[in-house]
Amino acid sequence: MTDETRYEIDAEQYKITEEPYYRPVGEEQELYEAAYSARMPVMLKGPTGCGKSRFVEHMAYKLGRPLVTVACNEDMTASDLVGRYLLDADGTRWHDGPLTVAARIGAICYLDEVVEARTDTTVMIHPLTDHRRTLPLEKKGEVVEAHPDFQLVISYNPGYQSLMKDLKQSTKQRFGAMDFDYPDAEVEAEVVAHETGVDKDTASKLVSIAERSRNLRGHGLDEGMSTRLLVYAGQLITKGVDPVNACRMALVRPITDDADMRDTLDAAVTTYF
Ligand SMILES: Nc1ncnc2c1ncn2[C@@H]1O[C@H](COP(=O)(O)OP(=O)(O)OP(=O)(O)O)[C@@H](O)[C@H]1O
Ligand SMILES: [Mg+2]
């Protein structure tokens, strides 16, 4: 098998076959499409569970590009990203990491929570995100030229990081950035209803509870209830769980261990259900 055919097979594996549901909130799709057509690296900023990953999946589908997603963490090394030699029956064999695969097959590569990665890992993306569009595989002695359709997308939760963990300016300034946030109440209710099958009224109540929690951000809560948690609550309700119990399990318990804060949030739940 030639390298070319292998990359084509890989590309098929990473293609998204069914359209992921994504409810646009503003002009994010048009902006992203323009950025993609310029092959501009993009940074998606926003709190947890607000739709960033779903958006990338939707756009990859729309653009017909394969999507390679990597969840970054502090233990991740440059080799985890670009590849390493592995020992098998025939001796040592080079194994491409996900970033290398994406660069070769012309995928959109989504590095989730990139700020968690160590700096020596993060700088690996530098030559890929400027005019060079190359990825040096030092251990292998190869410089991969990125496929013309390759694009790098990273996500970033502003506010969670300590100063120590922020991205370097030389990394940040390689990306166009888009802000994401929980959508307006009506849109968010539409999303929750669509994702779970609860009726519009129930979805709106869930959103109202979340809004109360979001107002407590910085006043005892690090973060309010995300759209993702609202979807969890809706799913429990559709499974027949009593809404109050569903909200306790999916909305209140995950976000705080503080007894007083739980009481406050539980009280908010009972005002609506
Ligand atoms: N605009 C939207 N359209 C469709 N679904 C949405 C939208 N916003 C949020 N969701 C729902 O919220 C859930 C969580 O979104 P997603 O996984 O994309 O969050 P995220 O921003 O990537 O979070 P994290 O930073 O924790 O990875 C999705 O599974 C989806 O059900
Ligand atoms: Mg995500």
Image (cartoon, rainbow, N blue to C red):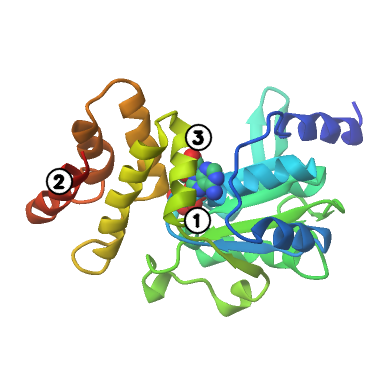
Q: Earlier in the sequence, mark 1 or mark 3?
A: 1
Name the spot of residue 20 as percent of width and height, x first: 63, 36
Q: Which residue is mark 3?
A: 194
Q: CA distance from mark 1 to mark 2?
A: 31 Å
Ligand 1 lies under 8 Å from the Cβ of mark 3: yes
Q: CA distance from mark 1 to mark 3?
A: 27 Å
Name the spot of residue 189 as percent of width and height, x first: 43, 45
Q: CA distance from mark 2 to mark 3?
A: 25 Å
Q: Does residue 155 appear left or right of residue 147 in this picture? A: left
**SS at mark 2 in the image:** helix
Q: Which residue is mark 1?
A: 113
Q: Is residue 134 visible?
A: yes
Identify the residue at image location x=87%, y=54%. 148
Q: Is residue 79 visible?
A: no
Q: Is residue 90 above or below residue 162?
A: above
Q: Does residue 14 appear left or right of residue 227 in this picture? A: right
